Image (cartoon, grey):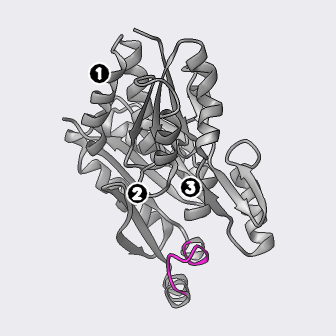
Amino acid sequence: MNPIKIFTDSTSDLPRQWVEQYEIGIVPLYTVFGNESLRDGVDIIPEQLFKRVSREGRLPKTAAPSPADFIQYFSPYIDQGMDILYISLSSDLSSTYQNGRVAGGEFPEGRVHVVDSKNLSCGIGLLVMKAVKAVRNGLGIQEVVQVLEEIRPRIDTEFVIDTLEYLYKGGRCSGMQNLIGSLLKIRPVIKVIDGKMTPAYKVRGKREKAIDQMLSNALSQKDNMDLELVIVVHALAEEDALELQKRLQEQTGAEVALATAGCVICSHCGPQTIGIIYAKKS
């Protein structure tokens, strides 16, 4: 049985210490300003992205890694005799998954396994950490894939978006919706359902009210929550994230980690976005 190298992409928003500790390979997506393609987390970080959007008044486009990018990242490990397990951004949101599969087809059969997370951000990251644990427990690559496919539909990912501005600039809501939302202080809450970003509900009023509602939703599943790992992810909202982490730990006893959203997630959701991700028990 060949050793396994776990890969994911930059949209997994994994904390840097986990990436280094568990030697997880990261394939970056791109944020594209005009003719300038910047690798997420390598050439540009969220603080720089937000400053540039504010200065230029427009959002970047985002782009998947090409099959050639994947081949470049995978090849050194294949040459070392390792098998690749790549856990991708949802195939419903990007061509990243498909491009990873195309790249995998360029290697000998069975050497590259590509799993569609059907998720984004730390919803992917949670699956990656489950894969890390399974590999460290000695499971073979097919067994790890089976574990991930069993857990995948039980991942719960919910975000509070602080402003409609980025959804408007990205063409995901109209100018009138943006204006009314801003005037009424409407904060949309997004859930990932069947691999897609789905508006779940809207909260009118203070930001804290929306965060409290998201926390209440998570706590309603406390008895059904896998307490091994819960993740709070944020985009330039560290103070709120720390408070959310504390409250979740106190009220569930879970291991609650903090993560920061990368540029691809930030370019769609905007600053001050905050989310809770966990798995439900089988």
Q: Secondary structure beneath disc 2? A: loop
Disc 3: CA contacts within 10 A as few (<14), some (14-19) or many (>=20):
many
Q: CA distance from mark 1 to mark 2?
A: 25 Å
Mark closer to the chain start, 3 or 2: 2
- Asked if the residue at tag 3 contacts the one at tag 1, i.e. Cβ–Cβ closer than 8 Å, the answer is no
* Residue 245 appears anywhere in the view: no
Query: Magenta stretch?
Result: 167-174
Q: Which residue is tagged 1?
A: 143
Q: Nearer the viewer, residue 138 or 116?
A: 116
93 vs 152: above or below = below
Q: Judge from the rendering whether residue 146 lies leftward or rightward of residue 269; answer left or right.
A: left
User: Which image quadrant is residue 22 in?
Assistant: top right
Q: Judge from the rendering whether residue 139 lies leftward or rightward of residue 123; answer left or right.
A: left
User: Which image quadrant is residue 109 in?
Assistant: top left
Q: CA distance from mark 1 to mark 3?
A: 30 Å
Q: Which mark is residue 92?
A: 2
Seen at 61% across and 25% down, the residue is 75
Q: Nearer the viewer, mark 1 or mark 3?
A: 1
Q: Secondary structure beneath disc 3? A: helix
Q: Amino acid at mark 1?
A: Glu
